Amino acid sequence: MMPNETIVTRRGLLTKLAVLFNGLIAVALAVPIVGFLLSAITRGRGNAYLSWVALGAVSDFPEGETRLATFRNPYVTPTDGKTADTACWVRHSEGSQFQVFAINCMHLGCPVRWFPQSGLFMCPCHGGVYYRDGSRASGPPERGLVEYPWKLEKGQIIIKAGELPTPGGSAALERRTPPCA
């Protein structure tokens, strides 16, 4: 006859199987959670929001005009697809002075349109209106359009595009009209 220590009871076997099964479930749930938490490090995009992106040559934006420009947001994931293409309004006031506005209305984020006849940006959603310099003219928005920080390099207009422009963000702390490069 065998000693009692080597006999496994049904209760003991089911307890060990339950612990093993629960451990497997815990690992299966932990892998995607840990992957999500470490994704910024593993993808190597750590400082993508600090990137500067070219909008085009200075000659693409004639003096005295406001034009729509698009850029690919540097802070993207493979599943972003076409949504990573972002639009902005570029105003060439005079000489080497530019303003680059986020396309979103400061009320609820609808895309504003530029109307050169009146010299106004207008929001089709709730009637927000902005002057050509991006300041608020009328409607529900409480502030003017948000500007991207910009600079000129080798005849190109470059903006700091990774971070979403917000009134209180770090972009607001930077100078709006840097010296010519």
Image (cartoon, helix red, strand yellow):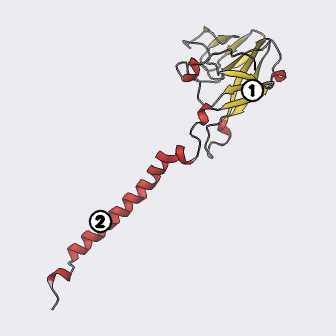
Residue 112 seen by the camera: no
Q: Is residue 175 above or below residue 24?
A: above
Q: Could you say where residue 26 lies in the image, as x and y percent from the top left?
A: 37, 58
Circle 1 residues within 10 Å: few <14, some 14–19, many ≥20: some
State the image quarter where residue 88 is shown.
Answer: top right
Circle 2 residues within 10 Å: few <14, some 14–19, many ≥20: few
Q: Please report the residue visible at 66 percent of the width from the left and 23 percent of the height from the top.
A: 103
Q: Could you say where residue 99 lies in the image, as x and y percent from the top left?
A: 70, 16
Relative depth, front residue between 90 and 5: 5
User: Element type at marker 2?
Assistant: helix
Q: Is residue 8 above or below residue 53?
A: below
Q: Which residue is mark 2?
A: 19
Residue 66 seen by the camera: yes
Q: Please report the residue visible at 73 percent of the width from the left and 17 percent of the height from the top.
A: 114
Q: Is residue 71 above or below residue 138?
A: below
The amino acid pointed to by label 1 is Ala
User: Element type at marker 1?
Assistant: strand
Marks 1 and 2, the one that precedes in the sequence: 2
Q: Quadrant of the image for the C terminus?
A: top right
Q: Please report the residue visible at 80 percent of the width from the left and 12 percent of the height from the top.
A: 95
Q: Quadrant of the image for the N terminus?
A: bottom left
The amino acid pointed to by label 2 is Val
State the image quarter where residue 62 is shown.
Answer: top right
Q: CA distance from mark 1 to mark 2?
A: 58 Å
Q: Which residue is mark 1?
A: 69
Q: Could you say where residue 16 lies in the image, as x and y percent from the top left?
A: 27, 70
Q: Does the CB distance between marks 1 and 2 fall below 8 Å?
A: no
State the image quarter where residue 158 is shown.
Answer: top right
Image mark for residue 18: none
| The residue positioned farthest toward the bottom in the image shown | 1
Q: Could you say where residue 44 lies in the image, as x and y percent from the top left?
A: 59, 45
